[in-house]
Amino acid sequence: MIHAYDSVDNAIVWVIVKKNLPELKRDCVSLIQQLGESFKTFNS
């Protein structure tokens, strides 16, 4: 399988990362908090 990574435009990738990273971080923090609450409930 050929992926053609050498044709990826790093500037475009960086714009996408900068645009979406805050939302991804917020979602990850929320999931971790939910898992923490589930873990507390499970061990009670």
Image (tube, helix red, strand yellow):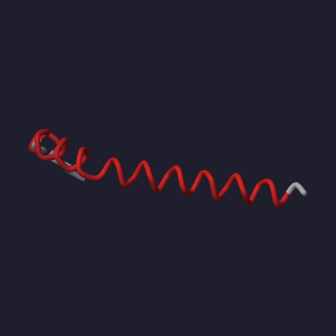
Residue at 35% of width from left, 49% of height from top? 22
Residue at 82% of width from left, 60% of height from top? 41
Residue 37, given in percent of the width and then of the height, sits at 72, 57
Q: How many marks?
A: 0
Residue 35, given in percent of the width and then of the height, sits at 67, 56
Tell which of 3 and 43 is nearer to you.
43
Tell which of 10 and 8 is nearer to you.
10
Tell which of 36 and 11 is nearer to you.
36
Residue 34, given in percent of the width and then of the height, sits at 64, 59
Residue 31, given in percent of the width and then of the height, sits at 57, 57
In the picture, the quarter occupied by the C terminus is bottom right
Q: Is residue 4 above or below residue 31?
A: above
Residue at 24% of width from left, 53% of height from top? 1
Quadrant of the rendered structure where residue 9 is?
top left
Quadrant of the rendered structure where residue 30 is?
bottom right
